[in-house]
Image (tube, rainbow, N blue to C red):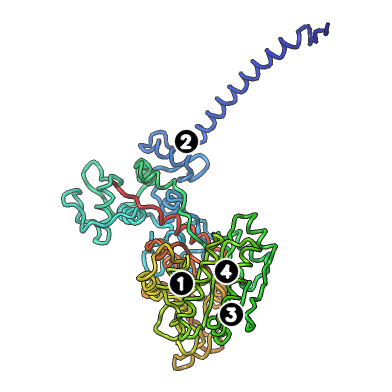
Amino acid sequence: MIPKLVWGGEDLKSMVGRLHIVTLAFLFAVSIFLSHLATADASQFQDIGTSYAKDEIIHLYNKKIITGTSATTFSPDRSVTRAEFIAILNRLLGLEPVASPVTPYKDLNQSTWYYGPVQAAVQLELAKGKSATTFAPEESVTRQEAAVWMARALKQSDTPSIVKKVFEDEDRIADWASASVGAVHKLGLIKGDDTGTFRPTDPLSREETAMLMDRVLQNDSWASELEKKPIERIMLGWQYGQTMEQYTDNILHSNVNTLSPRWYFLDKTGTMTDLTDAKLIAWGKNNNKPIWPMVGNRSDQETTHFILTNTTARNKVINQLADMVKTYELEGLNIDFENVAPADRQSFTTFIALLAVKLHDQDAVLSIDVSPDRGTSWTEAFDYAALGKHADYIVMMGYDEHYGELSGAGPNASLPYVTNAVHTLLKVVPGDKVILGMPFYNRDWTLKPDGNVASSAFITLTEQNEMMESYSLKPVWSEASGQYIAGYKKRSVQHMIWFEEGRSLIAKYHLVVNNGLAGAAYWYIGGESSDIWSSLRNAERYSRYSFSNS
């Protein structure tokens, strides 16, 4: 017989049973304590006990949308500043702070806590300053200013004017705010006081702000939208001038989900130059990043003509590319032939048609880079409609609007230029087959005394920002070009820069969203400044909201 184990005169079975009961009781007590602790954390503010917005404050605090003025105070009666209101609104919308150094406002200091939230709102056109050069971040936000910002943020179409006789003091509401006040009042977000007045120029209190934000979340449809994940679009990043380690490090900090290294180039003999990096292929598969290597022609018109028009050479290149896709298990190819002779228009289309058949047999993607149609010989070889029928995607390279002395000084990619390029392509190619290429580079223009171009220097966006700091530039936003513009003098010589940064890229990214395009592509990875990615993530996140009332 196995002897009975005892502990202090008690057998082991009884002891284990008693310990089990004690453990359960302890865990129950801990759960009660933690529950109480969570509630205590949520209602830690000692000054909201009599606030009419107590529940809303606790709700928003627990959702990390609103914060206190200290660890134990909320200051419900205190007016909310313009910066505080924007920060709360951004958290409601799920937007990231943006560290872009380019801002039109002289009173925004990068060292302040509110710089990033305000920049995010300004880039998305959700908020504007008190003037062209001042934002007044620490001034109290007025009730009518809050109404305007809420109407913009919730994408509510402005009504012609406020509904008559809603407020006794409607004649005090500014013309620029009247429609927004009407819109948010109709939605039940902002109400008047017991006397039937709106008090448009009065400061909004922190507890009123909590009520306003929480009412948005009480709309089930809106609350559901705010929880949705972003739409998955193609985000292609070209590799240029970087090692594999540099490129992949940039990719990990970006929004890019499709890789395009420059590996294959036409050769005069009809043999493809093969620069495949097996390590990058392995990295791509481990990180779930499809690879569409770029196939280039180095702008060599003579070699390109030979390959496209010589049947033997053309078939040899097509077969080599198909073999590479199979051998290296590539997910696709990106064809980038530039400076193709106009006479080779049909031959280029034939080349793409035959290559598409080979790639589609392997379930691989074929994408083609094209330039904006400006009625010149540079783009005459691109038959948009025919290429769109054979390729899976057409990448519109929306840049090089001004490229040197012949073009004159100007933006690399103004919004009207890119808009026209996209809309022209969409006339013959469906939006879901179009990818918009956007620039991560710019030009520093050197001008002659008469204003003509002396020279231009290729610069990355990081270099652009460093120049802004070195020369204390004060960029001014241009609605016409959708870009900031600044000039400076170096050794008494005039320079001009049309800036490419988060706000200008968001304006172009709206073309992707509004036209239902397949995605975006970036030339080139490593040329961007790190803040660009938070700007583009904000654009994608905010773009999925409709705030429909249906």
* Structural distance between the alpha carbons of marks 1 and 4: 14 Å
Label 4 SS: strand
| Residue where numbered disc 3 is placed | 312
* Structural distance between the alpha carbons of marks 1 and 3: 30 Å
Comes first in the chain, label 2 or label 1: 2
3 vs 4, front mark = 3
Residue 96 locus on image (x, y percent) = 49, 55
Q: Residues within 10 Å of mark 4 (few under 14, many from 20)?
A: many
Q: Which label was assigned to residue 264?
A: none
Q: Is residue 222 left or right of residue 464?
A: left
For residue 387, say whether it is visible.
yes
Q: Residue 273 occupies which quadrant of the picture? A: bottom right
Label 1 SS: strand
| Residue where numbered disc 4 is placed | 238
Q: Could you tell me which residue is drawn at 37 percent across and 62 percent down?
A: 514
Instruction: Check if mark 3's residue and mark 4's residue have beta carbons within 8 Å.
Output: no
Question: Front-most of 164 and 151?
Answer: 151
